[in-house]
Structure formats: C-alpha cells, structure tokens
Image (cartoon, helix red, strand yellow):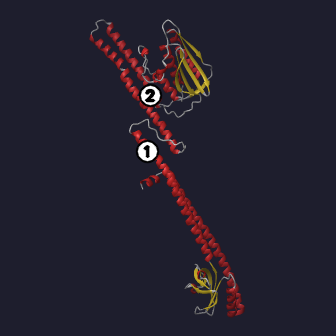
Amino acid sequence: MERLKALMRMTAVRLSAVYLLLFAVCAVVLVFYVTATASNILKSQSRAAIAEEISELGLIYETAGIIGLVRTIDRRARQPGASLYLATDATGRIIAGNVESLQAGVLDKGGFTENVFGYERFADNADDRYHIAVAEVVSLPNGMRILVGRDQTEQERFRQVVRSALILALALMGAAALLAWVFVGRRALQRLDRMSAASNRILAGDLTERLPVTGAGDEFDRLSENLNRLLARVALLQEGLRQVSDNIAHDLKTPLTRLRNRAEAALGGGTGEGVPREALEGMIGEADQMIRTFDALLMISRVEAGSHPVLKDRVDIATIVADVCELYEPLAEEVGARLVVDAPSPVPALVSRELIAQALSNLIDNALKYAVGKGRQTTVTIRLSAQDGNCILSVADDGPGIPADQHERVLERFYRLDQSRTMPGSGLGLSLVQAIARVHDGELTLEDAAPGLRVVLVFPLDGRTGSDDGG
C-alpha cells in the first residue's frame, strides 16, 4: 500500500492517470454520441416508413372498407421480412397480423409510441420469439385498432455490441495502464530508493557518495548529474575550508607570535627612542602581511563560491599580457631578471579582464620571487597562443623549479616548499590562479621547463560556462 501511495505521488503516474481518464471519458462520450445519433437516424427512418404504410392502409380503408383493410394487413404480415402488423377488434382480440402477443398498454394510446415496447411474434425457434419494436397505433370509428411498426431488435443488438466493445476496450486500456504503472513505476521507485539511500549516506557525512546515474538520459539521470555536480562543488568547498582552517592555524601562528614578541619587546625595556618605532614598524609589517593573506583567502573564496557574479567581456588577452608585463618590468630589472614576452595579437576571448590580469600577475610575481638567483640573470618567458578554441597562457622561468611530486601540493592553500619558507609570501598565489582558471572553465598545470618551472593556464576563448564539478 505504501509503495502504491508513493507511486501515485509521482508526477508521471498522475499524468498517465489523467490522460487515461480523459481518453476514457472522450471514448465514452464519442461512443454514446455515435450510437445515439445512429439510433435517432434509424428511428426517424422507421417513423417515416411507418407513416407511409399507415397512409397506404388509410387509402385502402377508404376504398375497400374494413374487410379490405384486414385482408391487406393479413397479406402483408405473411410476406418475408414483413414489418410489424396487427389488427384488433374493439375488445382487443387479435384479428389479423404477425404478432402473437403484445406488451400491455401499447394499444391504449393512439399515435406513435414514444419508447420501444416488447412483443411476441410467431416463430418456431423460442429464442427468436421475443423482440422489441416501435409502432404507430390508429383507432378506427368502430373501435378497431390498427398497429403498424418496425422491429428494433437489431438496432438494440447494435447498441449492445457497441457498449460491450466500449467496456472491453476500457478494461483493456485499464489493464495496459496498470501493467505500465507496475513496470515503469516499479523501476522508477527502485531508482528513487537508490537515490534516497545515497542521499542518506550523504546526509550521514559521506560527501564522496554520489547519486546513481543509469545512462538512460532521462529526468532522473539529469537530476542526479546536476546534484552530483553540486555535491562535488560542496565537497571541494568543504575541503578548501578544512585546508584553510588547518593552514591558518599553522601558518598564521608564526606571524602572530612574532607580532606578540615585538609588542612585548616594545613594552618591555627599550631605552632608545628608535626602539619603540622599529618595533611598531615591524608590527605593522607583520600585520600588513596577515592582511594580504586574508585578502587573498577572501578573494579565493569569493571566486570559488561564486558569491559575486564574474562579469566577462570580449577582450584581447594579448593586451592584458602587455599591460601586466609593463607593470612588472621595473621590478624585474630591480631583481636582475629579464621578461620575454611572446604574445601575438589579437587573441580575443570572453573573460573577466581583472581576474585574468590577477592570475598573470601572481604567476609573474612567483617567478620573480622564487626563480631569481644570486650572481645570474633569470629569464621569465610569458607566451600566449590560441589553439583548438582555447587560449594558452604560460609563464616559464629558468630557476630551480619544483619537484614533479610537489606539483599538486603547491596548488593547495598555504602549502610552501621548505626552501621558500624563508621568503615573504603566504602560499596562496597558485591557489588563487587555480580558482580563476576554474571560474573560466579552464585548468592550471605545472610542467618542468628543464631547467625551471612552466605554469600553463588554459581556458576557452568563447567563455562557455561549462558544468564544473570542481573535481
């Protein structure tokens, strides 16, 4: 019973039931309309034929009298396929005709009978004795009654056959609908049960669980696929939140400790006028670094969560590259590095100009910060190209690079290599670039430049908003 209730709650089953009901009502109305129309046509034809015969008998009565009328009725009643004829005297005794008995009350009222009536005719077969008919009754001046009618048994059988066919058709349709509901509804309920079980496991905390997809491509699969993408997105954000929480506790502990020590030193005992100022300047530097860290975290969270809409315009990526490289040219000269730009123009793409510029700035900043070595000039190469509908933007350096087994790790928030922990930074630069790549339905990969590191950012030129599952 519960499964039946669950089945009836399904929209598809309800629609099927409504369609079946509407079809059945239309079929009933159509059949009754056709049978009623056919019956009325036959009844009108019978009335016209009876009226014509009554008129002929009236002429015979006027010319040949009662005897001629009775003889004519008797002769016509004996012909094969004859209509219904009956002549009675004033007492109701049958004088002539092909009717053995008549339903009571038919002869009491003259004129055309409103409804069919039953009668018994002369026949050897008992099954063929009882029939129904319509007739017109005429009373003569001497009290005699003349009845002329047409048999309606075949018409009634026709109506019964149509009604039986209708009942059978409705029964077959009902059985077919019931079987369809059983098989289709049962399969749908099984899929819903599997989806419900998966949902319960997800609610229990297993965010790696996914709703089942059968590959049928129906509404259940589309719903499951959309929810699976949502779950993957939630899992990604939850993992990011966990990483942020862990890394904040680990990586911000050191600057907070230094900040506290500087404050304690400033309060504790410096005698020179410059001691408190130096301490305060150091505290401000530590505070600025933490503010930059939190700003980077906030930007990554906003980009990944989509809390603010990303406005995309058709812009030339080569122009963005030129502007960013021009901005970093003085810094490169200051640290003894050389920027090489290979960005043929134009490369139009539908992107967020600010986010792409931010991503390129982070990559160049990382290259200048970690690849520059003492006593040698570092070359940072920025290349831009378009291939197969994608924009390919890469930043390569000839520095020490990153071990291949650390390529995935450095994309995590706050993760820093041991050799880079002595340098300023928060370990969020590549995480932000990866978030920007995902917003543009692209991907970020790290490659060995032999020597050095090459970071490649690939995203579609047409700005399509693919269904990023965050995986």
Q: Which residue is depicted at the point 67% across and 88% down? A: 73
Give residue 458's position: percent from left, percent from top.
56, 25
Tag 2: amino acid: Ser
Tag 1: amino acid: Ser
Residue 87 in view here: yes
| Label 1 or label 2, whichever comes before in sequence order | 1
Q: Residues within 10 Å of mark 1 (few under 14, many from 20)?
A: few
268 left or right of 214? Answer: left
Give residue 467's position: percent from left, percent from top.
52, 34
> Residue 269: which quarter of the image?
top left
Give residue 466's position: percent from left, percent from top.
54, 33
Q: Is residue 166 above or below residue 281?
A: below
- The quadrant of the picture occupied by the N terminus is bottom left
Q: Which residue is depicted at the point 53% across and 55% down? A: 180
Residue 14 in view here: no
Name the residue carrying label 2: 301
Q: Is residue 181 above or below residue 394?
A: below
Q: CA distance from mark 1 to mark 2?
A: 31 Å
Between 164 and 305, the one nearer to me in the picture? 164
Name the residue carrying label 1: 196
Between 136 and 450, the one nearer to me in the picture? 450
Secondary structure of the residue carrying numbered label 2: helix
